[in-house]
């Protein structure tokens, strides 16, 4: 200081060291850093410590000062509040030098300050008086960044939080950041987490990571982190992307919320359970209107989104789609997934009658916005598989091993059921019933159906099983039996073969009927000649066509019911033929010496064989159509009005009676016996007045053996010395069926002696 009076200096005080003369004008500058990172970035942790190094100038040495700091929000310019209170700190010190530095330490809970840029305002006090301040809201040295990152992870195919577990998955995690320092280099490093396990996802034993380094041009913005990896086997996984922000290799922000939907990508899994709508098991009957319901269970779907499930029926054997009329069998349904887990039903309606014997597998594809996000297409998966069995049957007689058998007391038919498309290891039952083809109704024996069944467990999907029918076939001649078979499993009908016209299912029970006639007379009477021929016309029906048969006949003695024997041998005949049709006839010709069996009634028994096995028989001893009569004629001629013996006189009114003994007649049949007198010496008919002497009698046989008397009346006066023999012939229907023409038979002979006398004395 200088004191002047009238411009004249009268006093001066100019001591540069005089404290009383000295006034201090302090200045302060600050540099704030996080104690952990050592830089101007801190994480939004529960306990954060920021040290603000306050550099000062112009302080009075030895004086006590206090630096008080307050954290400010750079964005709003207001004080930062934690639990409603500003974040402050202060340090009191005594300046040892005019220039120096002091640290102000802020410790606070920063968890609510994520994404905040804070600026440390500092004020210098002495004696409670503010003497300096540093409160520049834009001063980088005073600034601490508390970054915030949030992520939105999506798949590059769907552009949403859902993708398919493919060999190559690309996830894009868009990291939104707040409160970054413009111009500084940062690195975002991410890794994929399994939400359910809350552990890192491992592919080939390694974590799936990705990172992006960037320099922000603005304090807030976004950056993409791209993950590309093999997602095979990750079905039913919710992937959560954890991201960490680094600068200068220091962790300054992290987003690792395992429940954050925005960080999550769903990798769905679907499983299917295909069943028939009617049987409610994995078997469908081959019907024109089949319905398979595939219940598709899904998991790890992004909720609240609409999906489309599309199913395709595949041929298990070929691995190709099932085609009906050239078109694949598909079905689809759109649905909204309210939860990540659930199920949806896919209904296939199709004509299964053309798919008998096929095993189908339901392949399912789940799409979101037209992009496939899950697939279940395992051709070997039993749960996806539906069997459409096919059965065909080949019914044969157990005796012939072919489609023909005899209608006998104990009939056994074996129906060989060939099957296709059965589930190996499953228990099935084949139930059969025999049908009468002509009636198109079930066969009834003693009022009950003829049924049989076999339960089996197939070792292969295709194979055969036998169903054996055993029943009383008496009276079933001329019947075509058709075996209808139905296949069951779990008591559900899953296959049927019931084709009444199917020859393979059919067994023929032949019937034969015979009509025996003499080859000469063409009626049922044969004359007892050395060379007789009987033709037995055997009519057959219900023969298996196209096969060779043999009909063998045997002549039976009706009275004894035993075979006719001639010279100790049976009288038999046989014919082998091929049946072109089921119905027809064949002739069996018996050639034999009938003279040895005159008076015998024979019955032709016939047996039909196929491959050496009898398949039909007609052996009714009382059957008139099978019967042939071989009458026997014997006569005894006598003079009725004279001697009643075989000798008589040459009388004018001679009466000869001939008792004709007939055996082997057909009762009820009309016969005529015709007789003529023969001249034994000439072998010609005896004539009187140029006329033959005849007699005849027509009668109806009331017994198999009868005696008929014929009476001959003649004038024998000219016949002295004649021996006459009566010849008798038996007729029926105008046909000669028996005779007695034995010129030397004494029983037939009548003598008319001639006498000459010479009288002598």
Image (spheres, grey):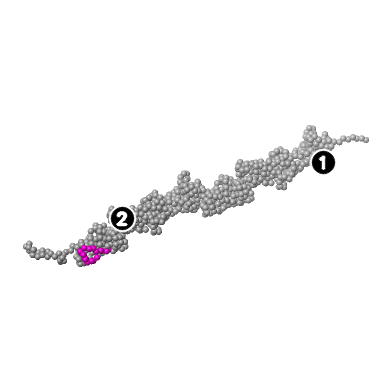
364 magenta-colored: no
Residue 61 versus residue 742 in the image, above or below: below
Q: Circle 1 — which element?
A: loop
Estimate the spatial distance between the alpha carbons at disc 2 and disc 1, rounded to whole Å.
161 Å
Q: Is residue 721 left or right of residue 225?
A: right
Residue in the image at 53% along x and 50% along y: 462
Which residue corresponds to mark 1?
644
Q: Identify the residue at the far left of this view.
A: 6
Q: What's the magenta region?
A: 91-106
Q: Of the numbered discs in the image, which one, if any, rests on residue 291? A: none
Horizontal and vertical percent position of residue 721: 83, 35
Q: Residues within 10 Å of mark 2 (few under 14, many from 20)?
A: many
95 magenta-colored: yes
The foreground one among 55 and 111 is 55
Q: Quadrant of residue 216?
A: bottom left
Horizontal and vertical percent position of residue 569: 72, 45
Which residue corresponds to mark 2?
186
Q: Quadrant of residue 521?
A: top right
């Amino acid at each position: 200081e200088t004191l002047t009076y009238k411009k004249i200096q009268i006093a001066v005080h100019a001591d540069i060291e005089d404290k009383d003369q000295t006034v201090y004008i302090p200045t302060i500058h600050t540099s704030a850093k996080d104690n952990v990172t050592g830089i101007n970035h801190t994480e939004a942790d529960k306990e954060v410590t920021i040290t603000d190094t306050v550099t000062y100038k112009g302080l009075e040495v030895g004086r006590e000062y206090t630096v008080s700091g307050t954290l400010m929000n750079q964005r709003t310019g207001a004080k930062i509040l934690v639990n409603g209170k500003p974040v402050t700190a202060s340090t009191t010190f005594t300046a040892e030098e005019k220039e120096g530095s002091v640290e102000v330490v802020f410790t606070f809970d920063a968890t609510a300050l994520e994404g905040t840029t804070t600026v440390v305002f500092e004020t210098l006090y002495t004696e409670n008086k503010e003497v300096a301040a540093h409160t520049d809201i834009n001063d980088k040295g005073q600034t601490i960044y508390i970054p915030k990152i949030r992520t939105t992870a999506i798949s590059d195919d769907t552009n949403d939080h859902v993708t398919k577990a493919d060999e190559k998955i690309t996830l894009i995690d868009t990291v939104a950041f707040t409160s970054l320092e413009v111009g500084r280099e940062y690195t975002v490093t991410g890794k994929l987490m399994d939400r359910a396990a809350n552990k890192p996802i491992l592919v080939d034993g390694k974590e799936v990571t990705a990172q992006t380094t960037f320099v922000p041009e603005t304090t807030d913005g976004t950056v993409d982190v791209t993950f590309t990896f093999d997602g095979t086997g990750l079905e039913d996984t919710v992937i959560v992307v954890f991201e960490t922000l680094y600068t200068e290799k220091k962790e300054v922000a992290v987003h690792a919320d395992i429940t954050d939907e925005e960080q999550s990508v769903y990798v769905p899994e679907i499983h299917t359970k295909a069943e028939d709508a009617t049987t409610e098991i994995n078997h469908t009957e081959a019907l024109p209107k089949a319905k398979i319901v595939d219940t598709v269970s899904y998991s790890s779907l992004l909720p609240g989104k609409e999906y489309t499930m599309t199913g395709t029926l595949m041929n298990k054997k070929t691995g190709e789609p099932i085609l009906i009329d050239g078109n694949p069998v598909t079905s689809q349904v759109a649905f909204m997934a309210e939860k990540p887990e659930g199920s949806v039903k896919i209904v296939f309606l199709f004509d299964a009658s053309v798919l008998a014997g096929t095993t189908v597998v339901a392949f399912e594809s789940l799409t979101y916005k037209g992009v496939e996000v899950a697939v279940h297409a395992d051709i070997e998966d039993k749960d996806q598989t539906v069997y459409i069995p096919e059965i065909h049957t080949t019914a044969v007689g157990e005796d012939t091993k072919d489609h023909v058998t005899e209608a006998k007391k104990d009939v056994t038919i074996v129906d060989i059921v060939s099957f296709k498309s059965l589930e190996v290891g499953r228990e099935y039952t084949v139930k059969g019933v025999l049908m009468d083809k002509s009636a198109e109704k079930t066969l009834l024996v003693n009022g009950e159906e003829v049924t049989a069944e076999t339960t089996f467990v197939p070792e292969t999907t295709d194979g055969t099983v036998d169903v054996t029918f055993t029943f009383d076939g008496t009276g079933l001649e001329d019947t075509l039996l058709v075996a209808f078979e139905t296949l069951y499993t779990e008591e559900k009908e899953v296959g049927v073969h019931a084709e009444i016209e199917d020859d393979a299912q059919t067994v023929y029970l032949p019937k034969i009927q015979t009509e025996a006639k003499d080859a000469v007379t063409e009626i049922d009477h044969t004359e007892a000649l050395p060379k007789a021929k009987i033709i037995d016309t055997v009519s057959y029906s219900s023969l298996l066509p196209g096969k060779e048969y043999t009909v063998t006949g045997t002549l039976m003695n009706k009275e004894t019911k035993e075979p006719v024997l001639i010279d100790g041998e049976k009288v038999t005949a046989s014919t082998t033929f091929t049946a072109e049709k089921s119905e027809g006839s064949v002739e069996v010709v018996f050639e034999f010496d009938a003279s040895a069996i005159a008076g015998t009634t024979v019955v032709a028994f016939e047996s039909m064989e196929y491959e050496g096995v009898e398949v039909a028989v007609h052996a009714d001893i009382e059957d008139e159509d099978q019967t042939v009569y071989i009458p026997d004629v014997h006569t005894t001629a006598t003079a009725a009005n004279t001697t009643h013996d075989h000798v008589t006189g040459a009388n004018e009114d001679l009466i000869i009676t001939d008792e004709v003994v007939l055996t082997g007649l057909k009762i009820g049949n009309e016969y005529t016996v015709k007789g003529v007198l023969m001249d034994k010496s000439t072998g010609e008919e005896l004539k009187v007045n140029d006329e033959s002497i005849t007699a005849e009698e027509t009668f109806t046989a009331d017994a198999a053996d009868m005696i008929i008397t014929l009476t001959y009346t003649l004038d024998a006066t000219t016949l002295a010395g004649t021996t006459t023999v009566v010849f008798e012939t038996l007729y029926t229907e105008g046909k000669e069926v028996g005779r007695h023409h034995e010129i030397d038979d004494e029983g037939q002979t009548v003598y008319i002696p001639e006498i000459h006398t010479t009288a002598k004395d």
